[in-house]
Amino acid sequence: MGLAVVLVAGLFATRLFFLQVVRAEHYREEADRQYLKTNRDIFERGDILAIKHDGTTFSLAGVKTAYVVAVNPKLLQDPIDTYERLKLLLELDRDQFMLKVAKPEIVYTEIATKVDQAVAEEIKALRLEGVILSKQKLRSYPFGHTASHTIGFVGYRGDEVAGRYGLESYYESVLSRREEVTFANFFVEIFSGLKNSLLVDAPSGRGDIVTTIEPITQKLLEKELLAARELWDAEAAGGIIIDPRNGEILALEAWPNFNPGERQADAAVLTHPLIEKTYEMGSIVKPLTMAAALDAGVVNQRTTYNDRGCVVLSTKKICNYDSKARGTVVIQEILNQSLNVGIVFLTQKLGADKLRDYFLAFGFGERTGIDLPNEAKNLTNNLDSHYEVDLATAGFGQGITLTPISITRALSVLANGGHLIQPHLVKKINYENTLSQTIESKPGPQVIKPATAEEITRMLVRVVDEKIPKVKMDHYAIAAKTGTAQMIDPITKSYYDDRFIHSWFGYFPAYEPRFLVFMYLVNPRGVQYASQSLTEPFVNISRSLLNYYQVPPDR
Protein backbone atom coordinates (compact mmCIF):
# COMPACT_ATOMS: atom_id res chain seq x y z
CA MET A 1 0.00 0.00 0.00
CA GLY A 2 2.83 2.35 0.88
CA LEU A 3 4.55 1.69 -2.46
CA ALA A 4 1.26 2.27 -4.30
CA VAL A 5 0.77 5.62 -2.55
CA VAL A 6 4.35 6.67 -3.38
CA LEU A 7 3.88 5.62 -7.01
CA VAL A 8 0.62 7.56 -7.43
CA ALA A 9 2.12 10.60 -5.69
CA GLY A 10 5.12 10.39 -8.02
CA LEU A 11 2.84 10.21 -11.05
CA PHE A 12 0.94 13.28 -9.87
CA ALA A 13 4.15 15.20 -9.19
CA THR A 14 5.58 14.31 -12.59
CA ARG A 15 2.36 15.27 -14.33
CA LEU A 16 2.23 18.60 -12.51
CA PHE A 17 5.83 19.28 -13.51
CA PHE A 18 5.00 18.83 -17.18
CA LEU A 19 1.83 20.90 -16.88
CA GLN A 20 3.30 23.78 -14.91
CA VAL A 21 6.88 23.89 -16.21
CA VAL A 22 7.42 22.04 -19.47
CA ARG A 23 4.05 22.95 -21.05
CA ALA A 24 3.40 26.18 -19.16
CA GLU A 25 3.63 28.42 -22.22
CA HIS A 26 1.26 26.19 -24.17
CA TYR A 27 -1.45 26.41 -21.52
CA ARG A 28 -0.98 30.16 -21.17
CA GLU A 29 -1.75 30.38 -24.87
CA GLU A 30 -4.80 28.17 -24.42
CA ALA A 31 -6.00 30.55 -21.72
CA ASP A 32 -5.46 33.55 -24.00
CA ARG A 33 -7.64 31.96 -26.66
CA GLN A 34 -10.61 32.05 -24.28
CA TYR A 35 -10.75 35.83 -24.51
CA LEU A 36 -8.42 36.96 -27.31
CA LYS A 37 -8.53 36.26 -31.01
CA THR A 38 -5.13 34.75 -31.87
CA ASN A 39 -3.40 33.57 -35.00
CA ARG A 40 -1.97 30.14 -34.21
CA ASP A 41 -0.92 29.04 -37.69
CA ILE A 42 2.83 29.50 -37.37
CA PHE A 43 3.68 30.98 -34.05
CA GLU A 44 3.77 27.99 -31.78
CA ARG A 45 7.28 27.23 -32.89
CA GLY A 46 10.64 26.44 -31.37
CA ASP A 47 13.41 29.02 -31.10
CA ILE A 48 16.66 29.23 -33.04
CA LEU A 49 19.32 30.33 -30.57
CA ALA A 50 22.96 31.38 -30.55
CA ILE A 51 25.34 31.70 -27.63
CA LYS A 52 27.79 34.56 -27.37
CA HIS A 53 31.38 33.96 -26.35
CA ASP A 54 30.55 35.21 -22.84
CA GLY A 55 27.78 32.62 -22.47
CA THR A 56 24.84 34.95 -23.12
CA THR A 57 22.01 33.35 -25.10
CA PHE A 58 20.82 35.30 -28.14
CA SER A 59 17.71 34.66 -30.24
CA LEU A 60 18.14 34.33 -34.00
CA ALA A 61 14.50 33.39 -34.50
CA GLY A 62 11.76 33.36 -31.92
CA VAL A 63 8.15 34.22 -31.25
CA LYS A 64 6.94 37.64 -30.13
CA THR A 65 3.52 38.96 -29.16
CA ALA A 66 1.95 41.72 -31.20
CA TYR A 67 -1.61 42.99 -31.72
CA VAL A 68 -4.21 43.38 -34.43
CA VAL A 69 -6.30 46.57 -34.39
CA ALA A 70 -9.79 46.10 -35.81
CA VAL A 71 -13.06 48.03 -35.76
CA ASN A 72 -16.75 47.18 -35.59
CA PRO A 73 -18.40 49.78 -37.89
CA LYS A 74 -21.77 49.28 -36.20
CA LEU A 75 -20.35 50.54 -32.90
CA LEU A 76 -18.38 53.52 -34.18
CA GLN A 77 -20.10 56.70 -33.03
CA ASP A 78 -17.79 59.14 -34.85
CA PRO A 79 -15.59 57.51 -37.53
CA ILE A 80 -13.73 60.73 -38.35
CA ASP A 81 -12.83 61.39 -34.71
CA THR A 82 -11.79 57.75 -34.30
CA TYR A 83 -9.51 58.02 -37.35
CA GLU A 84 -7.94 61.28 -36.13
CA ARG A 85 -7.13 59.77 -32.76
CA LEU A 86 -5.78 56.48 -34.16
CA LYS A 87 -3.58 58.07 -36.82
CA LEU A 88 -1.45 59.58 -34.06
CA LEU A 89 -0.40 56.05 -33.13
CA LEU A 90 -0.79 54.07 -36.37
CA GLU A 91 0.12 54.62 -39.99
CA LEU A 92 -3.37 54.80 -41.47
CA ASP A 93 -4.60 55.89 -44.87
CA ARG A 94 -7.70 58.06 -44.36
CA ASP A 95 -9.49 56.94 -47.52
CA GLN A 96 -8.90 53.26 -46.80
CA PHE A 97 -10.06 53.66 -43.20
CA MET A 98 -13.27 55.45 -44.18
CA LEU A 99 -13.94 52.86 -46.88
CA LYS A 100 -13.69 50.02 -44.37
CA VAL A 101 -15.93 51.61 -41.73
CA ALA A 102 -18.57 52.62 -44.31
CA LYS A 103 -19.92 49.04 -44.39
CA PRO A 104 -22.41 48.74 -41.50
CA GLU A 105 -23.19 45.10 -42.35
CA ILE A 106 -19.61 44.14 -41.30
CA VAL A 107 -18.93 43.71 -37.59
CA TYR A 108 -15.18 43.12 -37.79
CA THR A 109 -12.55 44.58 -40.14
CA GLU A 110 -8.82 44.81 -39.49
CA ILE A 111 -7.07 48.14 -39.95
CA ALA A 112 -3.56 47.35 -38.62
CA THR A 113 -1.49 44.30 -37.77
CA LYS A 114 1.86 43.64 -36.09
CA VAL A 115 1.27 46.47 -33.64
CA ASP A 116 3.75 46.65 -30.75
CA GLN A 117 2.45 46.14 -27.23
CA ALA A 118 3.35 49.68 -26.17
CA VAL A 119 1.23 51.14 -28.97
CA ALA A 120 -1.56 48.69 -28.21
CA GLU A 121 -1.58 49.86 -24.58
CA GLU A 122 -1.95 53.48 -25.70
CA ILE A 123 -4.84 52.55 -27.99
CA LYS A 124 -6.47 50.65 -25.16
CA ALA A 125 -6.17 53.69 -22.92
CA LEU A 126 -8.15 55.77 -25.44
CA ARG A 127 -11.24 53.61 -24.75
CA LEU A 128 -12.56 54.09 -28.29
CA GLU A 129 -15.99 52.62 -28.86
CA GLY A 130 -15.96 50.01 -31.62
CA VAL A 131 -12.15 49.56 -31.66
CA ILE A 132 -11.01 45.99 -30.97
CA LEU A 133 -7.55 44.81 -29.90
CA SER A 134 -6.60 41.19 -30.61
CA LYS A 135 -3.39 39.40 -29.72
CA GLN A 136 -1.33 37.81 -32.48
CA LYS A 137 1.96 35.94 -32.49
CA LEU A 138 4.73 36.73 -34.95
CA ARG A 139 7.92 34.95 -35.96
CA SER A 140 10.64 37.37 -34.93
CA TYR A 141 14.10 37.68 -36.51
CA PRO A 142 16.16 40.09 -34.36
CA PHE A 143 19.20 39.83 -36.69
CA GLY A 144 17.25 41.27 -39.64
CA HIS A 145 19.22 40.77 -42.86
CA THR A 146 22.21 39.27 -41.03
CA ALA A 147 22.63 35.51 -41.62
CA SER A 148 19.23 35.49 -43.34
CA HIS A 149 20.18 32.73 -45.82
CA THR A 150 21.31 30.53 -42.95
CA ILE A 151 18.31 31.16 -40.67
CA GLY A 152 15.67 31.03 -43.41
CA PHE A 153 12.07 32.00 -42.67
CA VAL A 154 8.60 30.63 -42.01
CA GLY A 155 5.99 30.75 -44.77
CA TYR A 156 3.29 28.84 -46.57
CA ARG A 157 4.10 25.53 -48.23
CA GLY A 158 0.84 24.79 -50.00
CA ASP A 159 -1.86 25.17 -47.36
CA GLU A 160 0.48 24.54 -44.45
CA VAL A 161 2.83 26.94 -42.74
CA ALA A 162 6.34 25.60 -42.35
CA GLY A 163 10.02 26.50 -42.40
CA ARG A 164 11.24 27.69 -45.76
CA TYR A 165 14.95 27.73 -46.50
CA GLY A 166 17.83 27.63 -44.03
CA LEU A 167 17.65 26.17 -40.54
CA GLU A 168 13.92 26.86 -40.37
CA SER A 169 13.46 24.29 -43.14
CA TYR A 170 16.18 21.77 -42.27
CA TYR A 171 15.03 21.46 -38.63
CA GLU A 172 11.30 21.73 -39.36
CA SER A 173 10.53 18.51 -37.49
CA VAL A 174 12.12 19.93 -34.34
CA LEU A 175 10.86 23.51 -34.57
CA SER A 176 7.28 22.92 -35.75
CA ARG A 177 4.33 22.69 -33.39
CA ARG A 178 1.22 20.72 -34.27
CA GLU A 179 -2.32 20.85 -32.94
CA GLU A 180 -2.58 18.85 -29.74
CA VAL A 181 -5.38 17.30 -27.71
CA THR A 182 -5.11 18.08 -24.01
CA PHE A 183 -5.82 15.44 -21.37
CA ALA A 184 -9.52 15.07 -20.75
CA ASN A 185 -9.22 12.71 -17.86
CA PHE A 186 -5.86 12.20 -16.20
CA PHE A 187 -7.11 9.28 -14.11
CA VAL A 188 -8.27 7.41 -17.20
CA GLU A 189 -4.81 7.71 -18.67
CA ILE A 190 -3.03 6.61 -15.50
CA PHE A 191 -5.02 3.42 -15.21
CA SER A 192 -5.52 2.69 -18.91
CA GLY A 193 -2.16 0.98 -19.27
CA LEU A 194 -0.99 3.33 -22.03
CA LYS A 195 2.79 3.57 -22.28
CA ASN A 196 4.39 6.94 -21.57
CA SER A 197 0.98 8.54 -21.04
CA LEU A 198 2.57 11.33 -19.03
CA LEU A 199 4.55 12.45 -22.08
CA VAL A 200 1.88 12.19 -24.74
CA ASP A 201 1.62 15.94 -25.29
CA ALA A 202 5.38 16.55 -25.17
CA PRO A 203 6.92 14.41 -27.93
CA SER A 204 10.68 14.19 -27.70
CA GLY A 205 11.19 15.41 -31.29
CA ARG A 206 10.12 18.99 -30.61
CA GLY A 207 12.28 21.68 -29.12
CA ASP A 208 14.65 24.59 -29.67
CA ILE A 209 17.92 24.43 -31.58
CA VAL A 210 21.16 26.00 -30.37
CA THR A 211 23.43 27.00 -33.23
CA THR A 212 27.20 27.25 -33.49
CA ILE A 213 26.85 30.84 -34.74
CA GLU A 214 28.52 33.39 -32.48
CA PRO A 215 26.55 36.67 -32.83
CA ILE A 216 29.48 39.10 -32.49
CA THR A 217 31.57 37.07 -34.95
CA GLN A 218 28.64 36.96 -37.37
CA LYS A 219 28.21 40.74 -37.23
CA LEU A 220 31.94 41.23 -37.73
CA LEU A 221 31.96 39.12 -40.89
CA GLU A 222 28.90 40.92 -42.24
CA LYS A 223 30.41 44.33 -41.60
CA GLU A 224 33.71 43.58 -43.34
CA LEU A 225 32.11 41.81 -46.30
CA LEU A 226 29.62 44.58 -46.98
CA ALA A 227 32.33 47.24 -46.70
CA ALA A 228 34.44 45.39 -49.29
CA ARG A 229 31.46 44.83 -51.56
CA GLU A 230 30.50 48.50 -51.49
CA LEU A 231 34.09 49.70 -51.92
CA TRP A 232 34.66 47.57 -55.03
CA ASP A 233 31.05 47.53 -56.32
CA ALA A 234 31.00 43.72 -56.43
CA GLU A 235 28.00 41.82 -57.78
CA ALA A 236 28.00 39.45 -54.82
CA ALA A 237 30.02 38.61 -51.72
CA GLY A 238 30.22 35.80 -49.21
CA GLY A 239 32.23 34.49 -46.31
CA ILE A 240 32.57 31.71 -43.75
CA ILE A 241 34.33 31.60 -40.39
CA ILE A 242 34.76 28.04 -39.18
CA ASP A 243 36.61 26.22 -36.44
CA PRO A 244 38.79 23.95 -38.61
CA ARG A 245 39.26 21.49 -35.75
CA ASN A 246 35.65 20.38 -35.37
CA GLY A 247 33.61 21.95 -38.18
CA GLU A 248 31.61 24.39 -36.01
CA ILE A 249 30.60 27.36 -38.16
CA LEU A 250 30.87 30.61 -36.21
CA ALA A 251 29.67 32.88 -39.01
CA LEU A 252 28.13 32.42 -42.45
CA GLU A 253 27.18 35.45 -44.55
CA ALA A 254 26.30 36.16 -48.18
CA TRP A 255 25.12 39.18 -50.15
CA PRO A 256 22.65 39.98 -51.66
CA ASN A 257 20.48 38.85 -48.77
CA PHE A 258 16.97 39.53 -47.43
CA ASN A 259 14.99 40.26 -44.29
CA PRO A 260 13.27 37.03 -43.20
CA GLY A 261 10.67 39.01 -41.25
CA GLU A 262 9.33 40.69 -44.39
CA ARG A 263 7.39 39.52 -47.42
CA GLN A 264 9.81 38.10 -49.99
CA ALA A 265 9.42 39.68 -53.42
CA ASP A 266 12.48 38.23 -55.18
CA ALA A 267 12.77 34.44 -55.04
CA ALA A 268 16.23 34.51 -56.66
CA VAL A 269 17.81 36.14 -53.62
CA LEU A 270 16.61 33.33 -51.33
CA THR A 271 19.12 30.82 -52.70
CA HIS A 272 22.03 30.31 -50.29
CA PRO A 273 25.15 31.11 -52.40
CA LEU A 274 27.55 29.48 -49.93
CA ILE A 275 25.68 26.17 -50.09
CA GLU A 276 23.73 26.10 -53.34
CA LYS A 277 26.08 27.75 -55.87
CA THR A 278 29.43 26.67 -57.28
CA TYR A 279 32.36 28.81 -58.43
CA GLU A 280 35.79 28.38 -59.94
CA MET A 281 37.91 29.24 -56.92
CA GLY A 282 41.25 29.99 -58.54
CA SER A 283 44.56 30.09 -56.71
CA ILE A 284 43.29 29.21 -53.23
CA VAL A 285 43.21 25.64 -54.61
CA LYS A 286 47.00 25.73 -55.15
CA PRO A 287 47.86 24.91 -51.51
CA LEU A 288 45.76 21.74 -51.84
CA THR A 289 47.68 20.71 -54.95
CA MET A 290 50.96 21.47 -53.16
CA ALA A 291 49.82 19.45 -50.12
CA ALA A 292 48.96 16.50 -52.35
CA ALA A 293 52.41 16.59 -54.00
CA LEU A 294 54.18 16.84 -50.65
CA ASP A 295 52.09 14.07 -49.11
CA ALA A 296 52.68 11.76 -52.07
CA GLY A 297 56.42 12.33 -51.72
CA VAL A 298 56.93 13.49 -55.33
CA VAL A 299 58.41 16.82 -54.14
CA ASN A 300 59.90 18.24 -50.96
CA GLN A 301 60.90 21.68 -49.67
CA ARG A 302 64.21 21.53 -51.55
CA THR A 303 62.69 20.59 -54.91
CA THR A 304 63.32 23.08 -57.73
CA TYR A 305 61.91 23.43 -61.24
CA ASN A 306 62.57 25.60 -64.30
CA ASP A 307 59.86 28.24 -64.61
CA ARG A 308 59.66 29.39 -68.23
CA GLY A 309 56.70 31.73 -67.75
CA CYS A 310 54.44 29.72 -70.07
CA VAL A 311 53.94 26.08 -71.04
CA VAL A 312 51.88 24.45 -73.79
CA LEU A 313 49.65 21.47 -72.93
CA SER A 314 47.41 19.84 -75.54
CA THR A 315 47.85 22.90 -77.79
CA LYS A 316 46.65 25.16 -74.95
CA LYS A 317 49.04 27.73 -73.55
CA ILE A 318 49.17 28.15 -69.78
CA CYS A 319 51.06 31.11 -68.35
CA ASN A 320 51.83 32.76 -65.05
CA TYR A 321 49.66 35.76 -64.25
CA ASP A 322 52.32 38.05 -65.78
CA SER A 323 53.70 35.55 -68.34
CA LYS A 324 57.20 36.14 -66.96
CA ALA A 325 59.75 33.36 -66.52
CA ARG A 326 61.39 32.90 -63.11
CA GLY A 327 64.10 30.45 -64.11
CA THR A 328 65.13 27.83 -61.58
CA VAL A 329 63.13 28.33 -58.36
CA VAL A 330 62.19 26.28 -55.30
CA ILE A 331 58.61 25.16 -54.95
CA GLN A 332 57.94 27.67 -52.14
CA GLU A 333 57.79 30.31 -54.88
CA ILE A 334 54.78 28.55 -56.43
CA LEU A 335 52.78 29.76 -53.44
CA ASN A 336 54.69 32.97 -52.80
CA GLN A 337 54.16 34.24 -56.36
CA SER A 338 51.08 32.12 -57.23
CA LEU A 339 52.75 30.56 -60.27
CA ASN A 340 50.51 28.60 -62.64
CA VAL A 341 53.51 27.05 -64.40
CA GLY A 342 54.67 25.74 -61.03
CA ILE A 343 51.31 24.04 -60.50
CA VAL A 344 51.65 22.41 -63.92
CA PHE A 345 54.97 21.01 -62.69
CA LEU A 346 53.32 19.62 -59.56
CA THR A 347 50.40 18.02 -61.43
CA GLN A 348 52.81 16.35 -63.83
CA LYS A 349 54.84 14.98 -60.93
CA LEU A 350 51.66 13.68 -59.27
CA GLY A 351 50.02 12.23 -62.34
CA ALA A 352 46.32 12.12 -63.16
CA ASP A 353 45.33 9.29 -60.83
CA LYS A 354 47.02 10.64 -57.71
CA LEU A 355 45.77 14.20 -58.27
CA ARG A 356 42.21 12.95 -58.71
CA ASP A 357 42.44 10.68 -55.66
CA TYR A 358 43.70 13.50 -53.43
CA PHE A 359 41.09 15.98 -54.64
CA LEU A 360 38.34 13.44 -54.06
CA ALA A 361 39.78 12.75 -50.60
CA PHE A 362 39.52 16.50 -49.91
CA GLY A 363 35.78 16.03 -50.42
CA PHE A 364 35.39 17.52 -53.90
CA GLY A 365 33.47 14.49 -55.16
CA GLU A 366 30.73 14.65 -52.53
CA ARG A 367 28.48 17.03 -50.67
CA THR A 368 29.69 18.14 -47.26
CA GLY A 369 26.45 17.11 -45.52
CA ILE A 370 26.07 20.48 -43.78
CA ASP A 371 22.75 20.84 -41.93
CA LEU A 372 21.19 23.20 -44.47
CA PRO A 373 18.84 22.27 -47.34
CA ASN A 374 19.56 22.08 -51.07
CA GLU A 375 23.35 21.68 -50.94
CA ALA A 376 24.74 21.71 -54.48
CA LYS A 377 27.16 19.16 -55.88
CA ASN A 378 30.61 20.24 -57.03
CA LEU A 379 31.27 20.04 -60.78
CA THR A 380 34.54 18.15 -61.07
CA ASN A 381 34.30 16.26 -64.38
CA ASN A 382 37.72 17.57 -65.41
CA LEU A 383 39.29 15.36 -62.75
CA ASP A 384 38.27 12.36 -64.88
CA SER A 385 39.66 13.90 -68.05
CA HIS A 386 42.43 12.26 -70.06
CA TYR A 387 43.73 15.65 -71.16
CA GLU A 388 46.77 16.90 -69.29
CA VAL A 389 45.58 20.49 -69.60
CA ASP A 390 42.34 19.77 -67.71
CA LEU A 391 44.21 18.30 -64.76
CA ALA A 392 46.71 21.16 -64.75
CA THR A 393 44.01 23.85 -64.72
CA ALA A 394 42.15 21.97 -61.98
CA GLY A 395 45.37 22.15 -59.97
CA PHE A 396 45.17 25.94 -59.89
CA GLY A 397 41.41 26.16 -59.41
CA GLN A 398 40.04 26.60 -62.93
CA GLY A 399 37.87 24.16 -64.84
CA ILE A 400 36.25 22.72 -61.70
CA THR A 401 33.54 24.52 -59.74
CA LEU A 402 33.09 24.15 -55.99
CA THR A 403 30.63 25.37 -53.40
CA PRO A 404 32.12 27.80 -50.87
CA ILE A 405 31.34 25.39 -48.03
CA SER A 406 33.13 22.59 -49.89
CA ILE A 407 36.36 24.55 -50.45
CA THR A 408 36.23 25.74 -46.82
CA ARG A 409 35.98 22.14 -45.66
CA ALA A 410 38.90 21.10 -47.88
CA LEU A 411 41.14 23.95 -46.75
CA SER A 412 40.42 23.06 -43.12
CA VAL A 413 42.35 19.83 -43.75
CA LEU A 414 45.54 21.91 -44.03
CA ALA A 415 44.85 23.61 -40.70
CA ASN A 416 43.78 20.71 -38.48
CA GLY A 417 46.50 18.14 -38.99
CA GLY A 418 45.12 16.52 -42.11
CA HIS A 419 41.63 15.16 -41.43
CA LEU A 420 38.30 15.90 -43.08
CA ILE A 421 35.69 17.63 -40.91
CA GLN A 422 31.90 17.78 -40.90
CA PRO A 423 30.72 21.41 -41.22
CA HIS A 424 27.65 21.99 -39.06
CA LEU A 425 25.52 24.81 -37.67
CA VAL A 426 23.62 23.21 -34.77
CA LYS A 427 25.40 21.93 -31.68
CA LYS A 428 22.50 21.23 -29.35
CA ILE A 429 18.76 20.53 -29.35
CA ASN A 430 16.80 21.37 -26.22
CA TYR A 431 13.68 19.21 -26.31
CA GLU A 432 10.34 20.15 -24.79
CA ASN A 433 10.50 17.23 -22.40
CA THR A 434 13.49 18.97 -20.71
CA LEU A 435 15.97 16.54 -22.25
CA SER A 436 18.68 17.77 -24.59
CA GLN A 437 20.91 16.33 -27.26
CA THR A 438 24.44 17.58 -27.87
CA ILE A 439 25.55 17.16 -31.47
CA GLU A 440 29.20 16.24 -31.57
CA SER A 441 31.28 16.13 -34.71
CA LYS A 442 33.84 13.36 -34.83
CA PRO A 443 37.02 13.74 -36.92
CA GLY A 444 36.66 12.36 -40.41
CA PRO A 445 39.17 10.35 -42.42
CA GLN A 446 42.85 11.31 -42.47
CA VAL A 447 43.42 12.89 -45.89
CA ILE A 448 47.08 13.91 -45.59
CA LYS A 449 49.67 13.04 -42.98
CA PRO A 450 50.01 15.36 -39.97
CA ALA A 451 53.59 16.11 -41.02
CA THR A 452 52.34 17.22 -44.44
CA ALA A 453 49.76 19.52 -42.86
CA GLU A 454 52.48 21.08 -40.70
CA GLU A 455 54.76 21.52 -43.71
CA ILE A 456 52.11 23.20 -45.90
CA THR A 457 51.22 25.43 -42.93
CA ARG A 458 54.84 26.58 -42.68
CA MET A 459 54.79 27.37 -46.39
CA LEU A 460 51.58 29.41 -46.10
CA VAL A 461 52.98 31.30 -43.12
CA ARG A 462 55.97 32.21 -45.29
CA VAL A 463 53.56 33.48 -47.96
CA VAL A 464 52.16 35.93 -45.40
CA ASP A 465 55.47 36.87 -43.77
CA GLU A 466 57.30 37.43 -47.07
CA LYS A 467 54.60 38.55 -49.51
CA ILE A 468 51.65 40.02 -47.57
CA PRO A 469 53.27 42.27 -44.93
CA LYS A 470 49.96 43.96 -44.04
CA VAL A 471 48.69 40.64 -42.68
CA LYS A 472 51.86 39.62 -40.80
CA MET A 473 51.72 39.78 -36.98
CA ASP A 474 54.66 39.72 -34.60
CA HIS A 475 53.13 37.31 -32.07
CA TYR A 476 50.74 35.28 -34.21
CA ALA A 477 51.56 33.08 -37.20
CA ILE A 478 49.03 33.57 -39.99
CA ALA A 479 48.70 31.09 -42.87
CA ALA A 480 46.91 32.50 -45.92
CA LYS A 481 46.54 32.50 -49.69
CA THR A 482 44.63 34.64 -52.18
CA GLY A 483 42.93 33.65 -55.42
CA THR A 484 41.84 35.49 -58.56
CA ALA A 485 39.86 33.36 -61.02
CA GLN A 486 38.48 34.27 -64.43
CA MET A 487 34.71 34.04 -64.80
CA ILE A 488 33.04 32.14 -67.63
CA ASP A 489 30.65 33.76 -70.10
CA PRO A 490 27.53 31.55 -69.83
CA ILE A 491 26.73 32.13 -73.51
CA THR A 492 30.08 31.65 -75.24
CA LYS A 493 31.46 29.27 -72.56
CA SER A 494 34.78 31.11 -72.77
CA TYR A 495 36.52 33.13 -70.07
CA TYR A 496 35.93 36.85 -69.73
CA ASP A 497 39.00 39.06 -69.95
CA ASP A 498 37.68 41.57 -67.43
CA ARG A 499 35.48 39.66 -64.96
CA PHE A 500 36.96 37.82 -61.99
CA ILE A 501 36.12 36.13 -58.71
CA HIS A 502 38.39 37.21 -55.87
CA SER A 503 38.86 34.76 -53.01
CA TRP A 504 40.86 34.60 -49.82
CA PHE A 505 41.42 32.05 -47.10
CA GLY A 506 43.53 32.13 -43.97
CA TYR A 507 43.77 30.34 -40.64
CA PHE A 508 45.23 31.41 -37.33
CA PRO A 509 47.02 31.01 -35.04
CA ALA A 510 48.61 28.91 -37.76
CA TYR A 511 50.13 26.19 -35.55
CA GLU A 512 47.20 25.96 -33.12
CA PRO A 513 44.34 27.15 -35.35
CA ARG A 514 41.10 28.40 -33.83
CA PHE A 515 39.64 30.04 -36.93
CA LEU A 516 39.66 29.60 -40.67
CA VAL A 517 38.27 32.51 -42.68
CA PHE A 518 37.10 32.18 -46.28
CA MET A 519 35.80 35.15 -48.31
CA TYR A 520 34.99 35.93 -51.94
CA LEU A 521 33.82 38.81 -54.14
CA VAL A 522 32.11 38.26 -57.49
CA ASN A 523 33.23 40.66 -60.21
CA PRO A 524 34.67 43.47 -58.09
CA ARG A 525 35.28 46.59 -60.18
CA GLY A 526 38.32 48.86 -60.25
CA VAL A 527 40.62 46.30 -58.64
CA GLN A 528 42.69 43.56 -60.26
CA TYR A 529 43.68 41.05 -57.58
CA ALA A 530 42.22 39.60 -54.39
CA SER A 531 45.36 40.68 -52.55
CA GLN A 532 44.13 44.24 -53.11
CA SER A 533 40.41 43.79 -52.46
CA LEU A 534 40.31 41.36 -49.53
CA THR A 535 43.48 42.01 -47.53
CA GLU A 536 42.00 44.73 -45.34
CA PRO A 537 38.82 42.77 -44.48
CA PHE A 538 40.95 39.76 -43.51
CA VAL A 539 43.28 41.89 -41.37
CA ASN A 540 40.32 43.45 -39.56
CA ILE A 541 38.63 40.10 -38.98
CA SER A 542 41.76 38.27 -37.80
CA ARG A 543 42.81 40.99 -35.35
CA SER A 544 39.27 41.37 -34.00
CA LEU A 545 38.82 37.62 -33.46
CA LEU A 546 42.17 37.18 -31.72
CA ASN A 547 41.31 40.05 -29.38
CA TYR A 548 37.65 39.10 -28.81
CA TYR A 549 38.44 35.47 -27.97
CA GLN A 550 41.63 36.36 -26.07
CA VAL A 551 43.67 33.81 -28.03
CA PRO A 552 47.23 33.33 -26.67
CA PRO A 553 50.12 33.98 -29.11
CA ASP A 554 51.75 31.10 -30.95
CA ARG A 555 55.10 32.73 -31.67
Image (cartoon, rainbow, N blue to C red):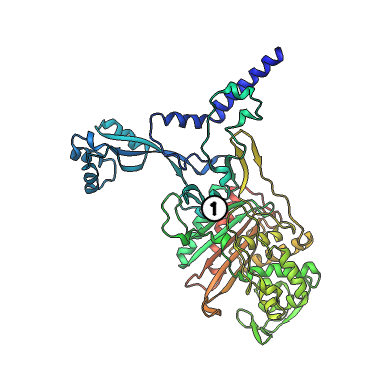
Could you tell me residue 95's position as x and y percent?
Answer: 21, 48
Amino acid type, mark 1: Gly
Would residue 172 appear left or right of 232 to someone viewing this image? right
Q: Which residue appears at 51% of the width and 63% of the height?
A: 237
Q: Give the residue pinned by disc 1.
A: 166
Could you tell me residue 419's position as x and y percent?
Answer: 74, 57
Q: Which residue appears at 50% of the width and 70% of the height?
A: 523
| Residue 196 position (above or below residue 378) | above
Quadrant of the rendered image containing residue 187: top right
Q: Quadrant of the C terminus?
A: bottom right
Would residue 380 appear left or right of 228 to someone viewing this image? right
Quadrant of the rendered image containing residue 65: top left
Say what secondary structure mark 1 lies in: helix
| Residue 537 position (above or below residue 41) | below
Nearer the observer, 62 or 407:
62
Can see residue 49?
no
